[in-house]
């Protein structure tokens, strides 16, 4: 059996939940990772790449200035060709974006899974029809997974087979930061203490909070790793102790974290962060770095209330928490961290998801087409 995964995130973007799960499911399935189309050609075609064994990334290229109906018609054509080329017959349709339903509804998956990792309708530039299509996806999905506790609480009434699978970690990968032999070349010239963040820089980051900390602690250096998206890079503060290094690969991250003294999560408290469950929280901890975060609900519930990380509400509180982290004895804290993370891994998450998938496959009625409904608009 195959998995056809429809994702709003590109495979070569920040390495997170979709890549972690699909790369592991590739041990059991062929994975076809369908990205959102690029509107950059005269004649539509599909570009394929193979970043990992048993994983094909599908990049649809379409002409610009298409109507929604024309776009969906071309995507159906390209997907039909892909299905024929690879003889995709028995497969699971796995959705990260409900927007893919509009062009995939006429295909015939054996199983439909919605892995809801974010409240996408709350993000900047979310399509107006996203919420409607998500409601439809809830009505046809066989299984729904959620990427965080807050999401589970708000979504659990929409489906009778919904399961909470919060952010996991590749613990061995990030533990490399604890004994990394040298500083990365672009951090070697940055004085310590180094306060670091990795992830997407968008409307979820509190830029003003970051700037205020840098203004108040000119002897600290703040290192930001990740792409800038959906916001104008010109609004980023330009300060000598604030270093935006751009995106780095997942493989490189432990080497960068190794050079930090403290890791931070300066998330804004807004609609886009209301339901997030940042994967970087356990990743920072596995790397052995003290963490200071704003009061993101899932972070507070699972990490702040247990004393694994510190929670701050403004620049002064962040500074106080970072000062404490810089002087604390890490040995007792690391023991508690390792104990808390012991049962947390993407491998275990995949095993537990596979259990739910097998149950659904065993009970699924044959010859059904759950995505084709007369009432779909």
Image (spheres, helix red, strand yellow):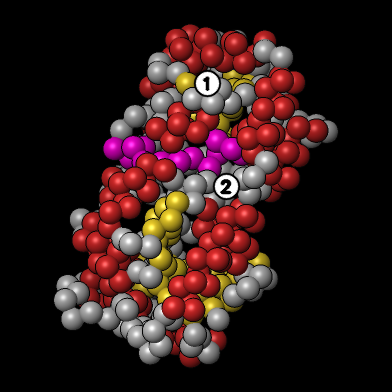
Mark 2, secondary structure of its residue: loop
Q: Residue 108: give x, y in percent of width and height.
A: 38, 84
Examine the rendering and report whether any part of residue 216 can be seen. yes
Across and down, in percent, residue 36 comes to 40, 65
> Is 65 positioned to the left or the right of 243 in the image?
left
Label 2: how many Cα within 10 Å (few below 14, some 14–19, many 20+): many
Residue 139 lies, in percent from the top left, at 27, 68
Please state the extent of the stretch shown in magenta in the rendering.
Answer: 271-283
Earlier residue among tags 1 and 2: 2
Nearest the eye: 165 or 53: 165
- Figure quadrant of the C terminus: bottom left
Quarter of the picture holding the N terminus: bottom right
Q: Residue at x 73, y 35 (%)?
A: 177
> What mark, if any, has residue 310 been given in the picture?
1
Circle number at residue 35: none
Mark 1 packing: few (<14 Cα in 10 Å), some, or many (20+)? Answer: many
Kind of element beneath mark 1: strand
* 224 shown above or below 359: above
Find residue 349 and report its image quarter: bottom right
Q: Which image quadrant is residue 308 in?
A: top right
Indicate which disc residue 168 carries. 2
Magenta segment: does it hold 108? no
Q: CA distance from mark 1 to mark 2?
A: 20 Å
From the viewer's perspective, is 79 left or right of 218? left
User: Measured from the top left, where is residue 310 in percent x and y?
Assistant: 52, 21
| C-beta proximity under 8 Å, tags 1 and 2 | no
Q: Report whether 268 appears left or right of 85.
A: left
């Amino acid at each position: 059996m195959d998995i056809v995964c429809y994702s709003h995130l590109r495979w070569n973007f920040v390495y997170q939940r979709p890549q972690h799960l699909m790369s592991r499911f590739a041990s059991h399935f062929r994975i076809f990772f369908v990205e959102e189309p690029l509107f950059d050609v005269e004649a539509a075609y599909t570009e394929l790449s193979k970043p990992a064994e048993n994983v094909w990334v599908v990049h649809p290229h379409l002409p610009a200035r298409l109507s929604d109906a024309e776009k969906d018609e071309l995507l159906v054509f390209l997907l039909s060709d892909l299905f024929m080329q690879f003889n995709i017959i028995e497969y699971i349709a796995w959705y990260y974006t409900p927007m893919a339903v509009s062009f995939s509804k006429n295909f015939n998956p054996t199983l439909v899974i919605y892995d809801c990792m974010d409240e996408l309708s709350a993000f900047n530039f979310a399509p107006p029809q996203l919420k409607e299509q998500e409601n439809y996806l809830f009505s046809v999905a066989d299984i729904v997974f959620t990427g965080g506790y807050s999401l589970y609480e708000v979504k659990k009434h929409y489906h009778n087979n919904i399961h909470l699978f919060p952010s996991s970690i590749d613990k061995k990968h990030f533990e490399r930061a604890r004994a990394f032999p040298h500083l990365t070349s672009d951090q070697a010239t940055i004085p310590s203490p180094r306060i670091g963040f990795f992830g997407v820089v968008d409307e979820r980051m509190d830029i003003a909070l970051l700037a205020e900390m840098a203004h108040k602690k000119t002897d600290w250096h703040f290192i930001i790793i990740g792409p800038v998206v959906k916001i104008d890079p010109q609004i980023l503060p330009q300060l000598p102790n604030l270093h935006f290094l751009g995106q780095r690969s997942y493989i490189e991250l432990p080497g960068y974290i190794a050079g930090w003294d403290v890791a931070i999560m300066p998330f804004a408290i807004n609609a886009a962060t209301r339901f997030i469950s940042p994967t970087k929280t356990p990743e920072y901890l596995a790397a052995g770095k003290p963490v200071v975060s704003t009061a993101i609900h899932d972070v507070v519930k699972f990490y702040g209330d247990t004393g694994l990380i510190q929670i701050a509400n403004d620049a002064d509180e962040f500074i106080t928490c970072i000062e404490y982290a810089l002087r604390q004895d890490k040995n007792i804290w690391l023991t508690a961290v390792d104990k808390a993370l012991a049962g947390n891994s993407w491998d275990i998450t995949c095993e537990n998801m596979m259990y739910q998938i097998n149950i659904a496959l065993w009970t699924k009625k044959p010859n059904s087409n759950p995505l084709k409904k007369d009432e779909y608009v």
